[in-house]
Image (tube, rainbow, N blue to C red):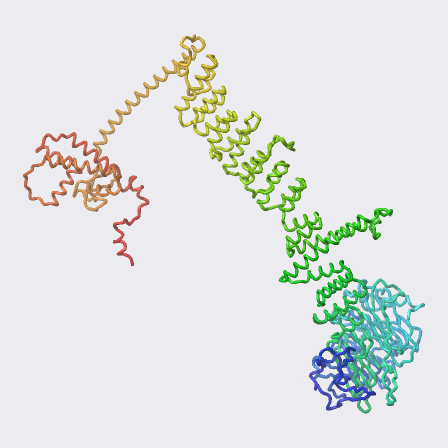
């Protein structure tokens, strides 16, 4: 669609539909070709779309705009369109807002001549107008009038090389090159100024001349090298020659201008007379390099193509096209390390102009030279006097041709391109057309495929179906060239049936290529294709194994080459060569196993590898899938205990350890224990069978230590194992050793401490059977059988051991003394040495000389221990004196206590008449009461009720017995037939009073029964007081002990619940 779609889309009302007939072909508005033709000339291929209509790649749209005068020249840059009219006016149109057209007058003198050409920079801001008299004008962006360029006076500009380094933030053009009609190249820099009379051109300096004044510079372009910002390439063309200039630019020292455009935006103000490109062109003054293509043309053009065309980041030109007499001279541009005299042009070709039917209806074909040419990524667009034609660069075929509807008096002028927006425009003296390009690369992949440029074809494929066609063609092409491995890799990307491809390689005997194909196909299968993956992987295993065997056979049968060893691997059919191939295939096979081990059927793979006798690969695969059973079993069969243990150490499954440990412990116990000790997840109980097969006596080990004891000690001490079976087994190993030293056994028993994890009875029996006396003594001691421990120690004449065990019952002094007496008896009777007995006596603080005297013979001289006997008698005398003193002190204490008791009975307290009972809140004097030292007072019955709730059961029972006894005595001594008017309540209260405080009743009843003695009543009263009134119920221990009782008792729950809201 045209960028001027805001205008009326159709132009048929003005120009109608163009129809021009050439021979048998009719070119109409349907893109220049008959719509019924099945051949698409824009691609050169027969349609395979079964009637599917695709939008044409090229089209030409008429711009609905009425020219106010004849059009002289036109330029488009950055979506800004400039039209120069023969009335010395300019039309400026912003294509983003095409309805607003600015009309600008060229301020000139009548003698300035006619407008010849306009030049518009890529940013769309700077415009230079040149006339046929050499007058030049400048227009900047939003200006409404042009300014003359005095320094350009007399110069007819034919081409300009704009500077890509110019940015929108810098109003200047930066350094630009200008080509003239007389073959000169100038350098200048334009910087717009707001003042009308201020000059925009800071300098205008000639930098080169082609020495042919009759040859105008028709094309001019420069490019900065990517890797060096001071190195530039300049291309200039005339009608018949093309020049290349490569070199380094110098610093710009012209008056008041910018420094060289180095891409970093730095500006340096310096004064001098050196232009930026002067240094570069100076290298070509004597011997300029050019190429000439003879021909007589009135004009010529030079165009460049860049894939990236953003305004702020314009890409480097990749290709060029030069319009010449013989044809379009085109090629690629390659920037590298070129220097002065070199060329950046590569892959140069000359496209001859296609022949077209003549205008005289004779049917002859004539070659017509186009007026203008434009360059796209894949096409050349040629403009003729009455048509537009597009030629594909890839096959030089005409893919588009359309007639331009020209009116009477109208002439096609030229074609212009917006390098930023990549729009193409054709203009005549009266009209403008936009050449639209839609999906230019649509069928490029087919053309590249035809040229067998497969990578380029793939780059332009749009869907998987297109890519499949490319892959298929490429694979078959490589197969026909016998490049089987490359063919196999590409076949894997195609949809060619699997069986067809495999049969192709099998029939050719290309097993290596088949292996490549299967590997590539396997890598492209989805995760869900498990069955296919397994089948392919299994087939590949078989192929790899066969290849390995084949290479081994070839290596063994090859003769050794006389060439030095370092070079033999480079010579085919030598042993070194085959061995190198063998290593490569083996590494590849192992990489394959690592990648696809999860897709292989393990039993089948084992059988395949084992059937080929590939032990190394067998072990590698088993290790890879974690099947350490097979690996360890293999090394055990080979009796390679070291490798077996190395594999076992990598295993994490305890069952594998339990399975192989017996045989490994039997043959290499030291390293086996090392492996065990590195595994903390083993159950030592499960390793007992392996330990039982270990015989320390038969093996010459790296360590003299018993390896079973070493491991079990590690388990017990480091791993804190508490299994009784392990402790009993370790105890057995210690006890049954040939060595008579019991240090290790005793250390083990002592380390067990009080929480013994071995069986004491078993340990005692075992130590007894093996004559481990010290250990037996220790075990007796642990069992609390101190007498047996001491007797056994004495039986073995180990007095020191007996003495140690005699001190162990620390809480039983009687037993300790008994044990010491046993030891003393043994010492006296065995040694029969009084001095040694006395020395032994000093070691104990429990025995005295009189304790051991009975052990001496009846007749013995006391001279040796007379002194000790005297000391003992003196100590007894001192002890008797101490006892007398203690008795006297006790008598005095008793007297003092009796005195305190008498005084306690006469103790009193003052009670006010207003004092109340702390239980019932009635006056104390209303009834018999108790008063405590804390000044709390209670009625006797109230206190009794309180005490009933807190007294222990045995005390309550005693209180009832006392009450019954007092009541019985009172009833027995009261008149039986006495009558009294006192009520029942009064009698009950009096009875309670007599029970609690029977002293008053005693006085009354004494008149009746004088036999009731005062002592008995007083005794009962004192006992009752001791129980009931022993402490205050409010501030005594009773109250403290009731802190955990609830405030509301069980009997008060109903009352409390009635208050609930």
Report whether 1025 appears left or right of 587: left
- Expressed as whole percent of the image width and height from the top left, the position of residue 213 reads 93, 76
Badge count: 0
Q: Residue at x 56, y 39 (%)?
A: 687
- Expressed as whole percent of the image width and height from the top left, the position of residue 980 reads 6, 42
Residue 101 position by quadrant: bottom right
Please state which of residues 1035 and 63 is positioned toward the viewer in this rendering. 63
Report whether 926 appears left or right of 531: left
Residue 945 position by quadrant: top left
Please state which of residues 85 and 149 is positioned toward the viewer in this rendering. 85
- Expressed as whole percent of the image width and height from the top left, the position of residue 726 reads 52, 36
- Dividing the image into 4 quarters, which one contains the C terminus? bottom left
Please state which of residues 832 and 660 is positioned toward the viewer in this rendering. 660
Question: Where is 346 relative to 69, above or below?
Answer: above
Residue 196 seen: no
- Expressed as whole percent of the image width and height from the top left, the position of residue 88 reads 81, 85
Residue 352 seen: yes
């Amino acid at each position: 669609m045209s960028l001027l779609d805001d205008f009326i889309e159709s132009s048929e009302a003005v120009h109608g539909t163009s129809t021009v007939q050439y021979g048998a072909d009719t070119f109409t508005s349907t893109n220049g070709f008959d719509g019924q033709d099945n051949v698409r000339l824009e691609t050169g291929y027969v349609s395979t779309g079964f009637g599917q209509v695709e939008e044409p790649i090229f089209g030409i749209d008429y711009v609905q705009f009425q020219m106010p005068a004849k059009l002289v020249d036109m330029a488009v840059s950055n979506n800004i369109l400039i039209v120069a009219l023969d009335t010395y006016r300019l039309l400026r149109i912003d294509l983003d807002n095409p309805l607003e057209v600015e009309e600008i007058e060229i301020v000139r003198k009548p003698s300035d001549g006619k407008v010849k050409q306009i030049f518009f920079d890529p940013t769309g801001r700077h415009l230079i107008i040149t006339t046929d008299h050499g007058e030049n004008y400048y227009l900047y962006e939003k200006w409404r009038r042009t300014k003359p360029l005095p320094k350009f006076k007399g110069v007819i500009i034919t081409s300009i090389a704009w500077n890509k380094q110019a940015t929108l933030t810098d109003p200047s053009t930066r350094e630009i090159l200008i080509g003239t009609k007389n073959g000169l190249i100038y350098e200048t820099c334009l910087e717009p100024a707001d003042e009308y009379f201020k000059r925009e051109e800071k300098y205008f300096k000639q930098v080169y001349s082609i020495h042919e004044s009759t040859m105008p510079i028709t094309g001019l372009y420069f490019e900065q090298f990517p890797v060096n910002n001071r190195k530039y390439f300049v291309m200039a063309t005339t009608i018949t020659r093309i020049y290349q200039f490569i070199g380094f630019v110098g610093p710009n020292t012209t008056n008041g201008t910018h420094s060289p455009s180095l891409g970093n935006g730095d500006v340096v103000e310096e004064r001098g007379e050196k232009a930026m490109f002067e240094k570069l062109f100076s290298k070509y003054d004597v011997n300029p390099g050019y190429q000439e293509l003879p021909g007589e043309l009135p004009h010529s053009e030079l165009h460049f193509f860049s894939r990236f065309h953003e305004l702020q980041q314009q890409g480097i030109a990749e290709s060029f096209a030069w319009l010449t007499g013989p044809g379009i001279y085109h090629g690629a541009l390659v920037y590298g390390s070129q220097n002065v005299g070199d060329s950046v042009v590569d892959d140069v070709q000359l496209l001859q102009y296609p022949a077209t039917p003549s205008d005289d209806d004779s049917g002859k074909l004539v070659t017509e030279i186009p007026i203008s040419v434009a360059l796209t990524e894949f096409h050349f667009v040629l403009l003729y006097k009455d048509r537009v034609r597009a030629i594909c660069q890839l096959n030089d075929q005409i893919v588009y041709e359309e007639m331009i509807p020209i009116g009477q008096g109208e002439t096609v002028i030229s074609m212009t391109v917006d390098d930023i927006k990549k729009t193409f425009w054709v203009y005549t003296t009266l009209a403008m057309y936009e050449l639209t390009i839609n999906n230019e690369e649509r069928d490029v992949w087919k053309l590249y495929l035809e040229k067998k440029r497969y990578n380029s074809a793939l780059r332009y494929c749009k869907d998987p179906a297109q890519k499949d066609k490319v892959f298929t063609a490429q694979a078959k092409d490589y197969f026909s060239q016998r490049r089987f491995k490359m063919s196999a890799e590409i076949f894997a990307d195609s949809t060619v049936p699997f069986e067809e491809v495999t049969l192709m390689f099998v029939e050719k005997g290309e097993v290596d290529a088949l292996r490549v194909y299967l590997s590539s196909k396997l890598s492209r299968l989805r995760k869900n294709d498990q069955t296919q993956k397994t089948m392919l992987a299994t087939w590949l295993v078989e192929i790899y194994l066969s290849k390995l065997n084949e290479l081994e056979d070839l290596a063994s049968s090859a003769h050794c080459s006389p060439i030095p060893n370092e070079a033999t691997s480079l010579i085919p059919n030598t042993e070194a060569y085959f061995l190198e191939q063998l290593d490569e295939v083996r590494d590849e096979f192992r990489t394959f196993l690592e990648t696809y081990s999860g897709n292989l059927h393990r039993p089948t793979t084992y059988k395949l590898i084992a059937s080929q006798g590939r032990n190394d690969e067998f072990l590698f695969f088993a290790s890879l899938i974690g099947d350490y059973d097979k690996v360890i079993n293999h090394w055990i069969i080979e009796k390679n205990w070291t490798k077996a243990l190395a594999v076992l150490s990598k295993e994490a499954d305890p069952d594998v350890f339990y399975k192989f440990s017996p045989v490994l412990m039997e043959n290499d116990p030291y390293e086996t224990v090392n492996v065990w000790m590195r595994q903390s997840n083993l159950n030592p109980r499960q390793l007992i069978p392996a330990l039982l097969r270990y015989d320390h006596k038969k093996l010459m080990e790296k360590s003299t230590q018993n390896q079973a004891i070493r491991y079990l000690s590690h388990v017990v001490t480091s791993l804190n194992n508490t299994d009784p079976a392990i402790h009993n087994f370790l105890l057995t190993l210690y006890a049954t050793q040939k060595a008579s030293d019991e240090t290790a056994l005793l250390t083990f028993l002592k380390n067990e401490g009080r929480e013994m994890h071995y069986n004491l009875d078993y340990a005692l029996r075992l130590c007894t059977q093996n004559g481990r006396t010290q250990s037996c003594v220790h075990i007796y001691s642990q069992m609390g059988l101190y007498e047996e421990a001491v007797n056994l120690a004495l039986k073995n004449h180990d007095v020191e051991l007996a003495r140690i065990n005699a001190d162990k019952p620390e809480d039983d002094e009687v037993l300790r003394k008994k044990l010491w007496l046993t030891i003393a008896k043994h010492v006296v009777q065995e040694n029969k040495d009084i001095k040694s007995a006395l020395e032994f006596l000093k070691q104990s603080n429990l025995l005295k000389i009189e304790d051991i005297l009975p052990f001496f013979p009846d007749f013995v001289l006391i001279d040796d221990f007379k002194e000790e006997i005297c000391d003992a008698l003196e100590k007894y005398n001192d002890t008797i004196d101490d006892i007398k003193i203690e008795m006297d002190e006790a008598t005095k204490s008793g007297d003092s206590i009796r005195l305190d008791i008498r005084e306690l009975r006469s103790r009193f307290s003052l009670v006010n008449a207003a004092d109340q009972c702390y239980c019932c809140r009635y006056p104390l004097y209303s009834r018999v009461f108790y008063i405590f030292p804390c000044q709390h007072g209670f009625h006797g019955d109230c206190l009794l009720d309180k005490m009933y709730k807190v007294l222990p059961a045995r005390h309550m029972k005693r209180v009832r017995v006392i009450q019954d006894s007092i009541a019985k005595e009172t009833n027995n001594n009261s008149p039986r037939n006495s009558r009294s008017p006192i009520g029942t309540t009064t009698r009950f209260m009096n009875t309670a009073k007599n029970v609690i405080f029977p002293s008053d009743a005693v006085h009354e009843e004494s008149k009746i029964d004088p036999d009731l003695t005062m002592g008995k009543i007083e005794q009962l009263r004192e006992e009752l007081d001791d129980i009931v009134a022993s402490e205050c119920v409010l501030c005594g221990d009773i109250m403290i002990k009731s802190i955990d009782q609830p405030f509301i008792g069980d009997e008060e729950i109903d009352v409390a619940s009635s208050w609930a809201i």
